[in-house]
Amino acid sequence: MFLDENGKKVAEKLKTRTLCGNCLGRMFGRVGTGFTNIHRAEIVSLETGSKFVGAEQCELCNGIFAKIEHYARIAIELMDTVEWHTFLVGSRFDEEILAKEEKIVIDAGATNAESIKVEFNRELGKKISELTGKRADFSEPDCVVIMDTRFDTAHLEVRPLFLFGRYRKFSREIPQTRWLCRNCRGKGCRRCNWKGKMYETSVQELVATKVIEATGGKEHFFHGMGREDIDVRMLGNGRPFILEIREPVKRTLDVGKLEQEINEFARGRVEVEGLKLVSGKLVEKIKEEKATKRYQAIVEFASQILPEKLENAINELREKDIYQKTPNRVLHRRSDLTRKRRVHDLKLCWLRGHIAQLEIECDAGTYVKEFVSGDQGRTTPSIAELTGVPCRVQTLDVIRINDMLEE
């Protein structure tokens, strides 16, 4: 038997209701597996003598389940305004229907009932698949269509595209991301020459321009594995990033061609490689990874320094922890904290008078310029402190990021 004693009692109470097969069946929606709710209604009818009507006569859904194909065609017409391969559906219902459903379920004691939204979404999804040959995806659908049964209208939510790659930045004059004018916050004012930005362009914009053209997207967001200062070049193996494109019209991309177009457009300033479409779940991994980084620094000392003195300081700092208070240069926008960072490797490449080239490998988040200068004692120990000679970074380049994404 399909129904137990409690199920039969529920069916008996529902005999006073005028319900369609979908609505009667879903009152037992959690009973058994592998059945549609229409099939459940047929079994309940055979076992208890319950009757069900066509959807047009249903006191609960008011004919909604008779219009599934109608709703599906509305949804498909809207979804076809963008490129999509997978989908998901949602719905909105009149509060009166939801209140009536709740009353019927409570009065009948239908503890195994399934909501009208669940049944509607499933049936609508099945019909869209039948008409298009495309499949529902409950994890990362290309688009989600929300059907409003109150007004026979639909709303479309398009999943963003996520494009992974690595960038190298050859300019010392552009930031990683768009930098809105501090004065007008992007609206445009005299200070920013009515551009709304502090800098003419950025890595984000140089990469995104061609991607927006290719996808027809409306907005772009840049997720980098950390960032370098504006005056620091990013060389070597490049910094991992994900470019997020909101509301793309086109999803199928020739990433090889796109990579060439970006590199031609950004020639001399930025270069990308390894572009590929990825899941949005990778954004969190990119943000959370704390990869060590290797830098090349040209350091200027206030006076000529003996090689032995510099080598001694380097040997003392290698594989040691340093403590850094928030640098003076960023105190206006960051909390004044003390951070412990490790210097994994430090070596002298050359020394000519009072100019030296160093390679420094350290933890993510290390303030390298302050590790050199000491920042008036806010970073300790530092190269300036251990040599006893004031010094500063002339130029700084990231030459390798030791992330796990290459494995």
Image (cartoon, grey):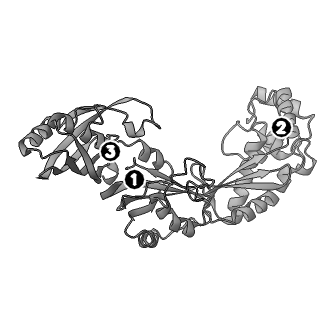
Q: Secondary structure at mark 1?
A: loop
* Labels 2 and 3: the sequence-earlier one: 2
Quarter containing the N terminus: top right
Which residue is painted at 51% across and 51% down in the image? 280
Q: Which mark lies nearer to you, 2 or 3?
A: 3
Residue 61 is drawn in which quadrant? top right
* Labels 2 and 1: the sequence-earlier one: 2
Which residue is painted at 85% across and 50% down in the image? 64
State how far apart marks 2 and 3 are (Cα): 51 Å
Residue annotated with mark 1: 230
Residue 337 is drawn in which quadrant? top left
Q: Secondary structure at mark 3?
A: loop
Q: Position of residue 390 (x, y in %)?
A: 21, 40
Q: Pointer 3 and pointer 1: residues touching (CB < 8 Å)?
A: no
Q: Position of residue 162 (x, y in %)?
A: 51, 56
Residue annotated with mark 3: 291
Q: Pointer 2 and pointer 3: residues touching (CB < 8 Å)?
A: no
* Near-viewer residue (160 or 53): 160
Residue annotated with mark 2: 98
Which residue is painted at 19% across and 44% down in the image? 302
* Near-viewer residue (352 or 101): 352
Amino acid under disc 2 = Leu
Please identify the residue farthest to the left as the structure is shown.
308
State how far apart marks 3 and 1 are (Cα): 20 Å
State how far apart marks 2 and 1 are (Cα): 56 Å
Q: In the rendered image, is residue 50 in sight?
A: no
Q: Determine whether, in the image, residue 373 is placed left or right of residue 130.
A: left
Q: Position of residue 396 (x, y in %)?
A: 28, 52
